[in-house]
Image (tube, coloured by chain):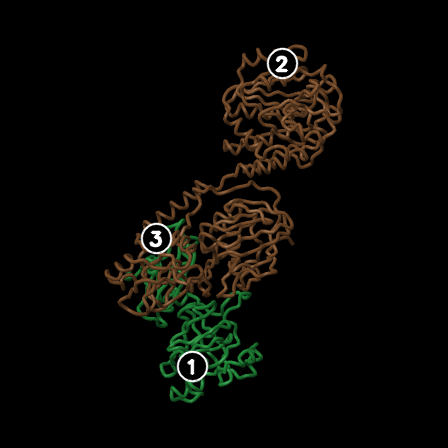
Amino acid sequence: MINPTINISVAGENSLILYLADNADSKVAAQIQSVTALITANLGPMLIDIIPSYASILVIYDAHLTDHFAVYKEIQKAMTIHANSGDILASKVDSKLVKLPVYYGTDSGPDLENLASNARLSVEEVINIHQSIEYRVYAIGFAPGFAYLGEVDERIAAPRLSTPRQRVPRGAVAIADRQTAVYPSISPGGWNLIGLCPTLMFDPNAEPTMPVKTGDRVQFESIDEQTFIKLGGDLSSFGDLK
Amino acid sequence: MTGFKVIQPGLLCLIQDAGRFGQHHVGLTVGGPSDRDSFKWANHLCSNSENSAVIEITVGGIVLESSVETFFAVTGASVPLTINKIPHSTWTLHKVNIGDRIEIGFATVGSRCYLSVAGGFDIAPVFGSCSTVTRESIGGLHGDGRPIEAGDYLPCSSSLLAAPRCLPKEIRPVHVGTAQSITVLRVILGYQQNQFTEQQKRLFFGSEYAVSERNDRMGARLIGPSIKPSAGGILSEGICLGAIQIPADGQPIILLQDRQTIGGYPKIGSVLSLDLDKLAQLPTHSLVKFESISIEEAHNLLHLAKAQQQRKGPIVDINLLSEQVERLMVTSNPRGMQTVSTAIQPGSYKRAAETIVACKGTVFIGTGFPVRDTFETDGPVGAIALYHAIKRLGGNPIMVCDAPLAKLFEKSFTTQEIHFDLDETQSILERHNPSLIISIERPGQAVDGRYYNMRGVDISERCANFDRFMSLATCPTIAIGDGGNEIGMGNIGDALAKLDIQPSTTTCDELLLADISNWAAHGLLALVSVLVEEDMLSNWDNDAVLTFLSDGGSVDGVTGENTLTEDSVASSVSQRLVKDLQILSGF
């Protein structure tokens, strides 16, 4: 039996945070997904909420039903179960592969040309590199439905814009450093926009609300304008941003 | 659909319930009330569930018009509250009627107040909650995160009856933040606390910070000595309520209800939620100071706060209850008692109840209104109610009446018979030495010294003199009447001149009016219930009491028939009134 060294800190009066690694990678993302599921199941009604992120899990518990000693033990237990049967569990956990269609192009991605020329690549090369990688959902936050995906190939990694846009349209596919994302709703934003995705990333009326969850895998697939529009995409929402 | 129409939306008014939980995995924050303590009390005053939707009013300035009869309360910051321009107190349940206008002015102490309504505002939840999070465009009246706007209609159902509860001053949260006082925020060290050197921690806990103008529901940005962690940014991680984030400029930000769910700044720990309630009420430029506590201490404080809240709570406001009972007692006004009630100083039921509670020893209860050769049902029913209550309070009640009622009472109650042709007042008083005398529906002498019924017929030949007990007594006296010809009505002689009756001139210390005298006894006991914190109206069976009297030959005072009615009103109506009085007194 492996007894994993684990790093759990107090976060607040009713929260503990579990750190699994110093850096995010796809193995850690899978581990976080499986441990999050174990903790959620073990704590049951004592759990108020849980936030899996890049390399940590914040566990928020009901301090009137339990305390940090008990929750600490539950987290430890989840880690031990995971360590002993991690691979089996990881394969059991619903780490699904989600394919997201993207209409790449200079009319749907106003920063595509700039990014390509800064990277000394052609637009086609940037598109091909972006869709060649199977990303992991590292975290969900910033705004409802905003999924941080990693890791972007170093060749097309690009820093945030010096002046963020006041308005980024819903569905914008974007790159910032070695992360990529699809904007779930209209919002300000400073990421480099390279295309549009017709899939709703956050739909309050859908079940589930989001097509992905933390730990899931994502692959982008290039589509043409016609397919984009057929899938419900709307180019006019973009108009004034270029 | 009933509800409140928004005439003026105020500076920032948001629908809030307890918050949106279990949705962090899709990036949704909690939302919910900034001052959870005041929010809880607002719902508590309305007897609502803990998660009912209220309006969080920042600074103030909201005007509402009610299209419904219901109850509401305002808690939190000190604000001027008016209903139809008449000032009303906060931390108290108030009635509103259709067309009433509720106005909340600007906060004088604190920043946020909470308006709750009986049953809560009826708003469709989004992701399990109707809490408004503007940043996320989630929740609120339309589900899209918009604050309350002029013309909005906030639906709520009607509520006709509720105990006038208030939260006593000593239990109310203290939200005073003035330039002179420094609010202490207790902190549980955590997260990246190891990245802060002892020296940085000493600086943090040893300094005062001011609440900056950049202070909203997402976070409170503070101004003071800069704190520097030994490392820079971190991988974005989950943020809990109250987390203290130290960004690059070293100025702490306390993350609040509408915080982002993940973030990449180092955090030194988190503020205790109990202290966030205080922070939520602090105006800009207020000073705060941090104090370190352990997680165990934090849990202890949370449990203590919960236990205290369960132990102490709203109480029924005796003055408001008295006003409501006095109004309720004369609502139908069959004999003009509502008309003459203005002649009585408000609070009569409360004062009478206090007299009863203070009284130890013997209490005379005089009753019995002769009708032909028997007695009417109005009077004895209330006398029986009072008799049982006084016994329950530890007193020694004695029924004082003439035959044939005295003969019936003798079987079940300690009874002192009096005679129309024999005056033993002095000797009876000396023998029993009562500490209180109550007269309920007992004929009182007119100016000519004679007794008249409501039709003006002289009944002196059948009526013993109880008036002399009232005038000779050295103890307090209470009298109840419903027509103007009863003992005690001498107190409001001028007002009675309007009525077409032969009024009684006999006075008392405290006169209680009602549409039916029996009802006054129940109303009085509702007030006694609140004073002694025990339901004096429990187990009242109006039918059983009327059956007992009817078997003894009683008649209805209005119809003259031997029926189970009081002044032609069905027994069920009285029974319902008792039920309503129980609700009003909070039982």
Q: Is residue B172 above or below residue B194?
A: above
Q: Which mark is residue B184?
A: 3
Residue receiving disc 2 = B417
Residue B294: image location, x then y, percent: 30, 52
Left or right: where B40 falls relative to B518: left
Q: Are marks 3 and 2 on the same chain?
A: yes
> Dot 2 surroundings within 10 Å: few (below 14), some, or many (20 or more)?
many
- Closer to the chain start, of discs 3 and 2, is 3
Q: Nearer the viewer, residue A39 or B88?
A: B88
Q: Which chain is brown?
A: B
Residue appearing at x 59%, y 23% in the figure: B438
Of the residues shown, which amino acid type is indicated by label 1?
His
Q: Which mark is residue A130?
A: 1
Mark-to-mark CA distance, 3 and 1: 51 Å
Residue A110: image location, x then y, percent: 47, 83
Q: Nearer the viewer, residue A223 or B40?
A: B40
